[in-house]
Image (tube, grey):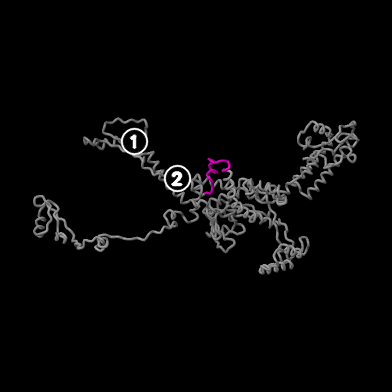
C-alpha cells in the first residue's frame, strides 16, 4: 500500500484468474508482463504525500497549501443605481433623449393621452383679456392675431411637457411696433451656454441638414430669398448661429437654478418604459409560439424497426406543405406516422402582476389620476376633487407662461409704444412740472410708508438706507416708475380662481364684511372688466331711453298702459319689473306714481302738472278724463322727452361718482326700468 502512495501502477483489467489486483511487489517484472499482455491496462497514480495527522480541523488550510483546491474571497459588491445596466442603457445626449420622448409620446397610449390632457386642459379656455384702453386693446389684438397667440402657447405647452424646454424666437416688426411671428425652435438644434452667475444665457442655433441644403444649393429659390445674409454666412462656414437674447424666450420644466436646461416629465419613467418593453418582447415571443407552435412529424415504426427512405420523407413533406396552404386538405397514410405540436403552454412567464405595477407607475409618473383619464369608477365628488387637484398643479405652468408672455412679449411692446402710466409722484431728473407731484410730495409719501418704525432705534442700517433714499427724492434723482398697460391672459375655467369653494367664500365675506371685498375683486372672479361693463351699462340706458321715447313719439303710450293693466308682458312693459307709463293719455299723463321698478319714474318723483297732483286734475294713475286731441299728444311727447333726458343725465352723474353698478343698482332700475 505504501508503494501505491509513492506513485506506482494499478492494473485496471482482469489479472490472474479474473481478479483485479493491486501490484505492491516485483514492480519491474510485473510491469513488463502487463506491458507485453494485450488484455491488460495500466493506470498511473500520481505520488501523494500521506497525511500523518488525523485531525480535520484545518483541512481547508492543508488543501490550499497542497495546491489541490483554489479558494478566493471577494469584497461585497457596492450597489450604485447610477451605474447599473438598466441605468446605463438610458442615453445621455439630448438629441437621443428627445427621440425617445417623442417615440413614447407617439406609441404609448398612457403617455400620449396624459400628455394630451396636460396640453389641452390648462389652455382649454385661454383667451386674451381686456385692458382699460380700447386703443391699446386693439393694438395687442392685432399682434395676437399675427402671432397666432393661442396656438403658439398651446404648442409651447405640449413641448414643455414632452421635451422639457421651449425656445421661442420672436420676429420684431419695427414699422408696426409689435412682434410679427413667434417660432418654436427645434430643441435638437439649440445649444444653450450659461452659468449660475449669468442673468441671460447664450443661445445658439445649430443649422440642420435642410437649412444647409437650401443654402448650398440655393433652391428652392422662394425659401433661399427669405434668409438673411448673416444666416447664409454662418451656414456656409458651418458655424453656430448666435441668437439675440431680446428675441429668445425660454420656458423650462423642472429646471434647477444652477442647471442650463429643464427635464421632460417622461424622463422619470424611462427605466419603467424600457422594462415594460422587455416584458412586451417576451410576450411577443410567447404569443408567436402560441399561434405558430413547433410541428414534429415522426414517420416510421420503432417496434419493427422500419425507417422510411428519403424519397418517402420528401413526399410526406410536400403533402404537409400543401396542408398548410389548404385548411380542408386531408392526408391518407398508414400507421407509421405521428404528428405532434409543441407550444409554450405551461411554460409562460407570469408577467400579469408586473404589468399592473407598470400601469400604476405610469400614471404616478405622469402626474395624472387614472379616473381623470379613463373616467371609470369613483363618484362625482371624487372626480371633482381630482379636477381641482389638476387645476392647482397647472397653476405653476400658468404662472410661467404669464411671466413669459406678459413681461417678455407684452411689456416689450408696451414699452416701445409708450403704453404706460406714471404711478410715482416724481418722474425723473428732467421733469420740473407738477402734473405728477413734486419731490416734497414723494418724501412725504415715503415718510408715511415707514412711519411705523420706532425711530429706527432697532435698525440703524435701514435708517442710513432711508435717509439716502429721501435725499435722492429731494434732489429728484429717482428715476420714474412706469405701470405698463397691456391686456392679461385669461385662463377661464382653468384659472385657480375658478374654484367654487373660493367663490362661495368671497360671496360670504362680501355679505358679512362688505368693506373687505371691493368691486374689482368681484369683477376679477367673474372674469369681467369693470370699464367695459360700465360702458355697456350706459349703452343699455341709452337704448332704453330711445325705446321709451319712440313709444311716446308714436302715440303708443295708451296701448302700453292698457297692456300694463292686463298683466306683465315682460321686458319694459307692465308688472313690477316692467315699464310704468302711467296714464299717458291727454288729460292725465301720470309719470310719477308708479312703484319702484317702473319705467319712467325717478324715486319719489312727483307727477307732472303740480306738486303731487296729476296734470289735468286726474288722480295718479286714473283713467283718461278728457278726449284725446293732437295738442295734448304733442304736449305729452315734449314733457316725456324732457323727463327722460333729465333722468338719464342724473343717473349718469350718480354712476360716475359712486359706480354702484356691480353691487347694487336699485336706484337706476327705479329710474329707467330694469
Q: Which mark is residue 51?
A: none
Question: Helix, strand or loop at disc 2?
Answer: helix
Q: Which residue is mark 1?
A: 321
Residue 216 visible somewhere in the drawing: no
The quarter holding residue 45 reads bottom left
Dot 2 alpha-carbon crowd within 10 angstroms: few under 14, some 14 to 19, many 20 or more: some
Picture quarter with the C terminus: top right
The magenta span reads 366-382
Residue 56 visible somewhere in the drawing: yes
Q: Which mark is residue 355?
A: 2
Taking depth in this image into account, of 345 and 382 the one nearest to the observer is 382
Dot 1 alpha-carbon crowd within 10 angstroms: few under 14, some 14 to 19, many 20 or more: few
Q: Position of residue 83 (x, y in %)?
A: 43, 57
The quarter holding residue 422 reads bottom right
Asked if residue 56 lies in the magenta stretch, the reply is: no
Mark-to-mark CA distance, 2 and 1: 39 Å
Q: Horizontally, is 562 left or right of 163 in the view? A: right
Taking depth in this image into account, of 57 and 590 the one nearest to the observer is 57
Question: Helix, strand or loop at disc 1?
Answer: helix
Q: Horizontally, is 386 left or right of 519 in the view? A: left
Amino acid at each position: 500500500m505504501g508503494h501505491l502512495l509513492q506513485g506506482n501502477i494499478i492494473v485496471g483489467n482482469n489479472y490472474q484468474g479474473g481478479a483485479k489486483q493491486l501490484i505492491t511487489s516485483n514492480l519491474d517484472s510485473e510491469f513488463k508482463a502487463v506491458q507485453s499482455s494485450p488484455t491488460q491496462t495500466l493506470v498511473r497514480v500520481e505520488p501523494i504525500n500521506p497525511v500523518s495527522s488525523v485531525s480535520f480541523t484545518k483541512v481547508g488550510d492543508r488543501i490550499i497549501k497542497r495546491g489541490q483546491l483554489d479558494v478566493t474571497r471577494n469584497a461585497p459588491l457596492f450597489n450604485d443605481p447610477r451605474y447599473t445596466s438598466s441605468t446605463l442603457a438610458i442615453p445621455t445626449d439630448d438629441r437621443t433623449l428627445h427621440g425617445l420622448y417623442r417615440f413614447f409620446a407617439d406609441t404609448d397610449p398612457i403617455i400620449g393621452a396624459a400628455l394630451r390632457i396636460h396640453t389641452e386642459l390648462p389652455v382649454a379656455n385661454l383667451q386674451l383679456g381686456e385692458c382699460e384702453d380700447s386703443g391699446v386693446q386693439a393694438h395687442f389684438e392685432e399682434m395676437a392675431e399675427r402671432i397666432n397667440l393661442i396656438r403658439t402657447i398651446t404648442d409651447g405647452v405640449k413641448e414643455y411637457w414632452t421635451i422639457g424646454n421651449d425656445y421661442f424666437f420672436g420676429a420684431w416688426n419695427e414699422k408696426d411696433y409689435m412682434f410679427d411671428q413667434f417660432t418654436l425652435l427645434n430643441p435638437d438644434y439649440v445649444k444653450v451656454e450659461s452659468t449660475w452667475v449669468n442673468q441671460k444665457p447664450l443661445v445658439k442655433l445649430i443649422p440642420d441638414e435642410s437649412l444647409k441644403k437650401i443654402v448650398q444649393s440655393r433652391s428652392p429659390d422662394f425659401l433661399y430669398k427669405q434668409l438673411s445674409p448673416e444666416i447664409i454666412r454662418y451656414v456656409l462656414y458651418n458655424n453656430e448661429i448666435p441668437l439675440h437674447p431680446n428675441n429668445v424666450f425660454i420656458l423650462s420644466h423642472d429646471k434647477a437654478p444652477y442647471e442650463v436646461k429643464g427635464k421632460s416629465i417622461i424622463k422619470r419613467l424611462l427605466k419603467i418604459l424600457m422594462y415594460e418593453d422587455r416584458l412586451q418582447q417576451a410576450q411577443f415571443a410567447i404569443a408567436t409560439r402560441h399561434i405558430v407552435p413547433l410541428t414534429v412529424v415522426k414517420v416510421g415504426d420503432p417496434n419493427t424497426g422500419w425507417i422510411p427512405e428519403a424519397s418517402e420523407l420528401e413526399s410526406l413533406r410536400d403533402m404537409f406543405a400543401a396542408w398548410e396552404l389548404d385548411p380542408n386538405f386531408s392526408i391518407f397514410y398508414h400507421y407509421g406516422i405521428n404528428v405532434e405540436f409543441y407550444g409554450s403552454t405551461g411554460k409562460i412567464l407570469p408577467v400579469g402582476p408586473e404589468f399592473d405595477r407598470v400601469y400604476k407607475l405610469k400614471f404616478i409618473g405622469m402626474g395624472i389620476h387614472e379616473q381623470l383619464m379613463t373616467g371609470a369608477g369613483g363618484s362625482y365628488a371624487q372626480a371633482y376633487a381630482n379636477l381641482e387637484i389638476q387645476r392647482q398643479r397647472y397653476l405653476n405652468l400658468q404662472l410661467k407662461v404669464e411671466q413669459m408672455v406678459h413681461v417678455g412679449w407684452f411689456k416689450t411692446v408696451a414699452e416701445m409704444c409708450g403704453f404706460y402710466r406714471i404711478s410715482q409722484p416724481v418722474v425723473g431728473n428732467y421733469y420740473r412740472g407738477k402734473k405728477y407731484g413734486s419731490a416734497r410730495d414723494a418724501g412725504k409719501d415715503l415718510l408715511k410708508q415707514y412711519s411705523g418704525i420706532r425711530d429706527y432705534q432697532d435698525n440703524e442700517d435701514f435708517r442710513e438706507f432711508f435717509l439716502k433714499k429721501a435725499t435722492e427724492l429731494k434732489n429728484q434723482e429717482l428715476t420714474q416708475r412706469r405701470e405698463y398697460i397691456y391686456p392679461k391672459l385669461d385662463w377661464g375655467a382653468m384659472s385657480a380662481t375658478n374654484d367654487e369653494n373660493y367663490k362661495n367664500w368671497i360671496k360670504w365675506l362680501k355679505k358679512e364684511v362688505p368693506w373687505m371685498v371691493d368691486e374689482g375683486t368681484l369683477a376679477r372672479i367673474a372674469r369681467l372688466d369693470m370699464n367695459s361693463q360700465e360702458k355697456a351699462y350706459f349703452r343699455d340706458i341709452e337704448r332704453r331711453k330711445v325705446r321709451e321715447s319712440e313709444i311716446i313719439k308714436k302715440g303708443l303710450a295708451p296701448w302700453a298702459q292698457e297692456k300694463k293693466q292686463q298683466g306683465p308682458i315682460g321686458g319694459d312693459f307692465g308688472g313690477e319689473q316692467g315699464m310704468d307709463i302711467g296714464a299717458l293719455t291727454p288729460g292725465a299723463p301720470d309719470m310719477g306714481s308708479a312703484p319702484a321698478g317702473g319705467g319712467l319714474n325717478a324715486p319719489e318723483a312727483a307727477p307732472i302738472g303740480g306738486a303731487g297732483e296729476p296734470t289735468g286734475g286726474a288722480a295718479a294713475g286714473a283713467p283718461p278724463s278728457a278726449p284725446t286731441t293732437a295738442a295734448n299728444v304733442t304736449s305729452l311727447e315734449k314733457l316725456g322727452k324732457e323727463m327722460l333726458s333729465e333722468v338719464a343725465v342724473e343717473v349718469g352723474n350718480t354712476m360716475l361718482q359712486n359706480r354702484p353698478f356691480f353691487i347694487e343698482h336699485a336706484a337706476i332700475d327705479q329710474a329707467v326700468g330694469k
